[in-house]
Image (cartoon, helix red, strand yellow):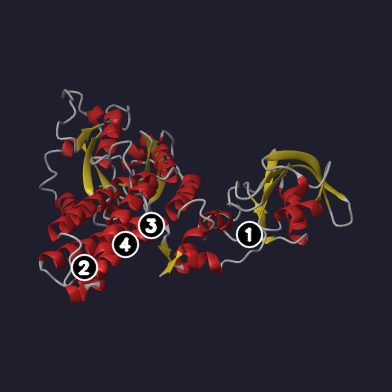
Amino acid sequence: MLNLSMIVKLRDNDTIAAVATAVGESGIAVVRISGQAALSVADKVFVGKGPLSNVPSHTAHFGKLTDADGSFIDEVIAVVFRRPNSYTSEDTVEFSCHGGRIVTQKVLQRILSAGARMAEPGEFTKRAFLNGKIDLSQAEAIGDLIHSQSDAAYKSSLRQLSGDLSREIRTAREELVNLASLLELELDFSDEDVQFANRKTLEDRLGEAVETVSRLISGYSVGRIYKEGVRVTLAGKPNVGKSSLLNLLLQEDRAIVSDIPGTTRDTISESISLGGILFRLTDTAGLRETGDLIEFEGVKRAERESLEGDILLLAMDYGEKEMVQSDLIYRKLIESCAKKDVRVLKVFNKIDLYKTEAFRQPSDKSSYYVSALTGEGIESLKKGLYEMALAKKSDENSVVVTSSRHFDALKRAKNSLNSAIESLKSRKSGEFVVFDLRCGLDALGEITGEVTTEDILNNIFSKFCIGK
């Protein structure tokens, strides 16, 4: 493992450039330059009232961007950010030119020919991290913010970007560093049998650290939903109205609806937002015995998809409500979902065909009566989906872990800290306790980037767009 200072020494000092806005036709586009020679490169291509290398930081300047022979490329506004007060903590110049593929590429190619090189994916943010502007969890939050597809994902990314998670991790690490330092000091005086830390106090303080880590781990189930959304599979027998339910939830005719059994033969996926949470809905083929090879494959896919989601929306005809436990297809599917920890929400459709009954929504919150034809009961179903997805919803102001990388690091940290506690209880030598403590510290350090590897960094920033 490498610490941050070691990685900073390994980075190059090239000046980089890239288009920072989306490719395509637009009012303006932004081309960003960052690095030691950013201002001198900008001066080679920009013609204004004077050299950009002489202007103050955080100022905007109108001028022309010209080719090497002085020919006109575009009118631009250059915004100068002097180090360390820039996104990357390096000298940075951002050219706002007219939007459009051709003009933007010509501006970028001119800057590259003047001495900059093309930035790698996420390299601007990577430099912000390497220069200490942000930590690694905040860098990841920037990527999550850009890719957020729901209000919940947006809000959780903002909290992480503001440093909420980082502060929790740093507080825990500082406490553990103090404990490790006391134990290592004892080891230096091992011949004198000196004890600098009371063992019961050490055990209690380690227990508090484990509680903090455990709390962060427990929030991941909700955090993953905030970030990735809820995977909901619609399953059931043919002609129970799965496709009609999908269309009603989406409020559009996405799936083909027909009286002919077996119309849906493959999975159809779309997304909706309920209460700020993204729900990824997948309609599947009707579950039944069939001799049709194509439909048979669709049924197999439906069974597999049902066990890979977070929630199974099991659609049935209202007339079958007394047969759920006795029907072999339904019973096997519900039992398989229980083994896979997939929650089942039973939806009894076509209540419009049973007008002689007075319909009240069941009180168990896992069954709903609806009519895909009239829309009756659909709002209750949406509310039920939301409540089932966030059965363990956290406090809106609490720190929520959304990254699987962070979740894995927290689990390793917890295991190491628990091992340290066990070593203390069994009165093992301080070396064993310190070793486990250091492993826990390293795991937590991976989250903020205080301890990391080039492979981890490359994997994280390769998922960014080139201009970020």
How many angstroms separate mark 3 from mark 4 (CA)?
Answer: 10 Å
* Quarter-of-image position of residue 186: bottom left
Pair 4/1: label in front: 4
Specify the amino acid type for callout 4.
Answer: Leu
Disc sitting over residue 441 in the figure: 4
Q: Which residue is mark 2?
A: 433
Q: Which residue is mark 1?
A: 119
How many angstroms separate mark 2 from mark 4 (CA)?
Answer: 12 Å
On screen, residue 317 above or below 178: above
How many angstroms separate mark 3 from mark 2 (CA)?
Answer: 22 Å
* Quarter-of-image position of residue 48: top right
**3 sits left or right of 290 in the view:** right
Disc sitting over residue 317 in the figure: none
Specify the amino acid type for callout 3.
Answer: Ile
**Disc 2, SS:** helix
- Residue shown at the point (24%, 66%) measured from the top left: 183
Q: Which is more N-terminal, label 4 or label 2?
A: 2
Residues under numbered marks 4 and 1 in contact, where contact means CB atoms less than 8 Å apart: no
Q: Which residue is mark 3?
A: 447
**22 sits left or right of 297 in the view:** right
Q: Which is more N-terminal, label 4 or label 3?
A: 4
- Residue shown at the point (42%, 53%) measured from the top left: 137
Q: Which is more N-terminal, label 3 or label 1?
A: 1
Specify the amino acid type for callout 2.
Answer: Val
- Residue shown at the point (63%, 59%) measured from the top left: 119
Direction front: furthest residue? 192
Pair 3/4: label in front: 4
Q: Which is more N-terminal, label 1 or label 2?
A: 1
